[in-house]
Amino acid sequence: MPQKLKLQNVVPSYLPEKYVLNSGVWNQSFEIDSGSHFQFQALSGKGKSTLINCLFGALKSYSGDITIGGISLKTANHQQLSSLRSSVLSCVPQGLGLFQNLTLKENIELKNALTKHKTEQEIAEMAEQLGINSVLHQKASTASFGQRQRAAIIRALCQPFAFLLLDEPFSHLDNDSTSASLTLILNEAEKQNASVVLTTHHSTNHPSFKAYEI
Amino acid sequence: MKSNLVHKVVGSQYPLWRTVLLIIVLILGLGQTYVSTHFYLLYNKANSQHHDVHHEYYISVTKPINTVASMSNPNANGFTNAEIKNIQNQDFVDRVGAFNPTLFRIVIEPPKGMGHQDFRTLLFLESLPNAFLDVDTTNFKWKEGDKYVPAIIPRSYLDLYNFGFAQSQGMPQVTEGMIKLFVFNLEVKGPKGSHKLQGKVVGFSDRINTLLTPESFVNWGNETLGSVSKSELPEQLLLKLKNPLSSDIGSFFEENQYEISKSDGAKAALTNLINYSSFYVWLNGIIVCALSIIILLLVVYLSIASSKTEIMQLFFLGYGVGKIALPFQKIAAIKLLMAAFISLPIGAVVAGMIVKNSAQLVPFNSAGFQLQLLLVFGALVLLICALVVLLIKVRIKRLSV
């Protein structure tokens, strides 16, 4: 079922005013329809992670409103948020949010056990595609950041979603890994008719994405 | 798999020393609760089977004997209606009963064919409202023309006879049942006339330390036989107290120069003190238990605080409050039940050692007591368990906002 992610004059409370003026995102109103992809580009400190956190309902200290399917993320209760996060919103935060005492595979299974969205075979295929199959049984604490980024992307794909939020997901990946990850993400989004929203320092130059300057 | 992984994520915040310490504290708390519940139930059970001894407080009140005054005024030691009313109006008094004495002369002798035929003695009888008696009063009635005058005597008098007089005089010991079968000859005599009557003992009192006969007999005798005494006022009162620990009791009687039976007062006060003490012991056990539960909650809250980052990450993955709280709830419930299980035999041994001797002094029917104790303790543990589980969920929920 198509969903709409609406932003209405959102201004984070702690963002300096100079970043709000002339911003293509802050204090603007626009809609993200599922199926369309957006890329928000900005230099460090201009609020890329803030935007992803606001869209994910992890940050609520802002003026304006963000709604998904009519539910305000600012006022949603814990039941609405957990429902959204397991079936509508998926996210790869900048810090990845992996559990260091679990293996990369366990981190992926933790999500998939909740949603039962992927089979073990499908997870193995995704890991193979991103080149981390050999390190899946390694503790997250001992994996490289790039390997962890790819595991976090796989984990984010282990659920049904209408919006996939990615906060600088390729920052520690080489070009080949970036390309493989982007292909996997877009294929999965297409299957689910979902929208991909990513933030980045540098444009991906992918034609599927509408680019915005924050 | 899922719950194991959640447990692996948030359940690693319990160092062994903290777990061991917590279980010891819980054993102490629950053990104390078991022992105090044991005492409380034991006391209440014994209390209910000895109701009269423990729940009603009586003292007898007289005026101090003043020989000169009583010689000049026969009513000097009697209580006037105003004085009785004043006593009745005191907050610590439930009700007042006046001993109404026979004013005529009574001579008693044993029935023919029994004991020493030359045994005759003067006797006095008194009446008291039936509401103050601790004896079945079905047969304690008299009207003119009745065959027997019923009497109630103190049980201690029978003990005095059996274990003192009978032995020293070579007479047979008698039971209460035997005494009730005896018919005594009574000769009542006053200025207006005399009668020969027969009397029977119909009951034995643990409360009243005098010889009682129905009020109707006393009134009849005093009117028809006339008075050999010049005193017309009751000289002894029996008071049923509302609160024997009231500080007003001592001051009131001292101010009015009344004398109270020290042993009755002390017994009543002591009994009431025991009532309060048993409740206090139970309350104390509950407080110690509550403290140990608070420590359990603090340890769980500390673990939740230590796992805050992991809990937030689980929320972001879409896990709900219930699923995240489950490992914390399981750990707390297991520790609580383990401690309860261990504290049960320990508490039983400790309580058994303490009450061993007192149970012999105050015997009571213990049927079903252990089962009742286990049910109360079990219900208490389950209630605590449910409360802890609920509080953990509330704590996790707060982090979700």
Image (cartoon, coloured by chain):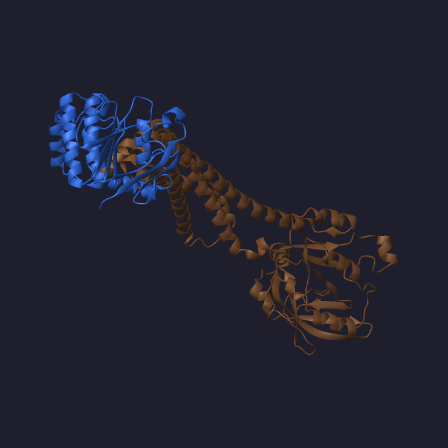
Image height of B141 relative to B69, above or below: below
Image height of A175 relative to A109, above or below: above
Left or right of B385? Residue B148 is: right
Image height of B232 relative to A75, above or below: below
**Image quadrant containing the C terminus of chain B:** top left
The percent coordinates of residue B315 (x first, y second) are: 31, 36
Is any part of residue B123 visible from this angle?
no
Nearer to us in this view, B135 or A119: A119
Left or right of A178? Residue A75 is: right
**Image quadrant containing the N terminus of chain B:** top left
The percent coordinates of residue B307 (x first, y second) are: 34, 30
Q: Residue at x 39, y 51 (%)?
A: B371
Q: Residue at x 16, y 36 (%)?
A: A188
Say which quarter of the image contains residue A158: top left
The percent coordinates of residue A51 (x first, y second) are: 32, 31
Say which quarter of the image contains residue B72: bottom right
Nearer to us in this view, A162 or A19: A19
Say which quarter of the image contains residue A181: top left
View extreme (right): residue: B72
Q: How many marks?
A: 0
Left or right of A107? Residue B205 is: right
Is any part of residue A15 visible from this angle?
yes
Nearer to us in this view, A89 or B370: A89
Nearer to us in this view, B51 or B283: B283
Q: Which chain is brown?
A: B
View extreme (front): residue: A22
Chain A shade in the render: blue
